[in-house]
Amino acid sequence: MYFFTATINNWQNLLSNNDVKKIITDSLSWLSKENKAYIHGFVIMPNHIHLLWTINNQNQVNEIENTLLKYTGHEIKKHLVSKNSELLENYISTPNDRAYHFWERRARTIEIKSKEIAIQKLNYIHNNPIQEKWKLVSLPEEYQFSSAKYYVCLDSEFDFIVHFNDFI
């Protein structure tokens, strides 16, 4: 099990748009359906994401992370081209390896080795939207783009969430 964090380039609030958030949840759903990863917890904040997940093949952790970031970057670009092309200028890549750069280059991954740490990271994920800096909702389970509702109310619109207890 891993705790994963990825941030939008220059901490811009690109993920404030619900259509862009849906690109990420659709990607998580695909990873789940393809049995590449089990998603235990997530939150999509205006400029970053946190995941608690288990990658099915431990040798492919970096590959799955890169797949998620590359695919979502491609889909975000398509979305911006069709809906808000002037915003693309904020993400022009300086290296010549790509035209646009949406995610910071150094995503962070921490292996979770105990149930206590998994609970701590899950609480951190779920409390992100209520932090002083964001104040997006009053209660974690009120935030739509999070797994908090699944854990608090045993209900979720995201069918890809798998309880972490089954994996720790």
Image (cartoon, rainbow, N blue to C red):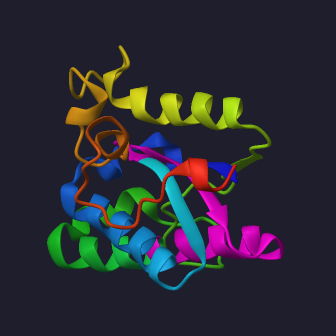
Q: What is the residue that sits farthest to the top in this orientation?
A: 132
Residue 131 shown left or right of residue 141 in the figure: right
The answer to whether residue 44 shows anywhere in this view is yes
The answer to whether residue 8 shows anywhere in this view is no
Q: What is the residue that sits farthest to the right in this orientation?
A: 59
Q: What is the residue that sits farthest to the front in this orientation?
A: 166
Residue for point 45% across, 82% down: 33
Q: What is the residue that sits farthest to the left in this orientation?
A: 83
Residue for point 64% across, 67% down: 65
x, y percentage for residue 28? 44, 68
Residue for point 83% across, 74% down: 59
Residue sitting nearer the eye, 136 or 16: 136
Residue 44 shown left or right of residue 68 in the figure: left
Q: Is residue 141 magenta?
A: no
Residue sitting nearer the eye, 62 or 34: 34
Q: Residue 35 occupies which quadrant of the picture? A: bottom right
Residue sitting nearer the eye, 43 or 11: 43
x, y percentage for residue 118? 64, 38
In this view, 115 is above or below 60: above
- Point out the stretch of residues depicted in magenta: 43-72
x, y percentage for residue 96? 65, 77
